Amino acid sequence: MRKNIAVSAFLFLLTISFLQAKSQDIPIKPIIVETAKTIKKEADTSKWNWKRGGLLNFSLAQGSLSNWAAGGDNFSLAVSSYFNYFIFYQKERISWDNNLDVNLGYVQTTSLGSRKNDDRYDITSKYEYKMDTTGKWYLSSLADFRSQFFDGFTYSNNVGTFSSTFLSPAYALLSLGFDYKPDHKLSVFISPLTARLVIVANKELSNKGAYGVDTGKSVKSELGSFVTINYKNDFDKSVTYKGRLDLFSNYIDHPQNINVFMTNQIAFKINRYFSATYSLDFIYDDNVRLFGPSGHSAALQTKSLIGIGYLKKLDTKKILLHPQL
């Protein structure tokens, strides 16, 4: 388990370091562009209460084979989508950050039929009070809710076994702690006191005792420590990265078995309308025992998706404190 955590953290930091190095290779812009950036930066310092914006991505990948000696599916089609929206509030030392992530994916092949390959929604709300004049340390409370929309199946020999559905599982988390933000790109939230609920609303899964919930029960309560690292940056006009690493240790039950949740989203802009995107996710939860030869073991879950499609940044809008009439 410690090895899985170390690998996840290493990949997270390696990705950030690589993209930062890339950004340093950008040639010096003409004076007129730098002047425009300076003017824009000065305009951004205007006082405002609310800021909102987001990102929409839709990708498509298709393949077909005919008389192909190497073998493979005659036809495959994969569709993936990602939606992000945020609402941010600040006033003096108070800030309130709200974020929504939605991932949906679907794949169709001639041999495997149709099935989803991505399904998740994640809502996070963080309320903070600035503790020092440097603005790097905040006293914070964080709430997070994560689940999925549709039925999920695990497959063995192309036979599907029902394994998840709406609110089964769902994870609700409430934390009190400290947030370190050296700049607007990086946030490191550390909580020694976190309450976590594992929800299995579906009766069939509940009766199996799925996801660590006691057999026949719908909710499992946990108390532990929680760390979440978030990094987001536009390295230039063509490369955007967003990453998140969550670690949770349950004080009550096997605290050494740390839960890992990690997401990475990278977008490379091709032109005004199209971009190449890549996502890489890792999940480890010792209570998710659906894998191995017998189908009753925990394992590191990985998901990797790549595609070319439509990428649209939703315009960031700000509401001024004292707008001019």
Image (tube, grey):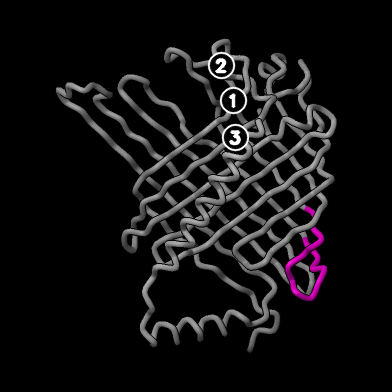
Quarter of the figure with residue 180: bottom right
Q: Gap in Å between the C-alphas at discs 1 and 3?
A: 9 Å
Find the magenta span and give its range.
128-141
Residue 114 picture location, percent across and down: 40, 25
Q: Which residue is mark 3?
A: 283
Residue at screen point 37% across, 20% down: 112
Residue under the image location 82 percent in, 61 percent down: 139
- Local crowd size for mark 3, using a 10 Å CA cut-off: few (<14), some (14–19), many (≥20): many
Q: Position of residue 258 (x, y in %)?
A: 71, 34
The quadrant where residue 146 appears = top right
Q: Which of the two labelled residues, at mark 2 and mark 3, occupies the earlier sequence position?
A: 3
Q: Are marks 1 and 2 in contact (CB under 8 Å)?
A: yes
Image point 27% across, 24% down: which residue? 73
Q: Report the quarter where the C terminus lies.
A: bottom right
Label 2 CA crowd tier, 10 Å (few <14, some 14–19, many 20+): few
> Looking at the image, is 47 positioned above or below residue 118?
below
| Relative vertical location of residue 253 with respect to residue 174 in this rendering, above or below | above
User: Residue most toward the left?
Assistant: 67
Q: Residues within 10 Å of mark 1 (few under 14, many from 20)?
A: some
**Image: 106 above or below 175:** above
Helix, strand or loop at mark 3: strand
Q: Amino acid at mark 2?
A: Gly
Residue 67 magenta: no
Q: Please provide percent x and percent y for residue 101.
A: 58, 48
Cβ atoms under marks 1 and 3 closer than 8 Å: no
Residue ID for mark 2: 292
User: Which residue in the rendered view is the most extreme toward the bottom?
Assistant: 325
Query: Which mark, by number, is residue 299?
Result: 1
Q: Is residue 313 left or right of residue 145?
A: left
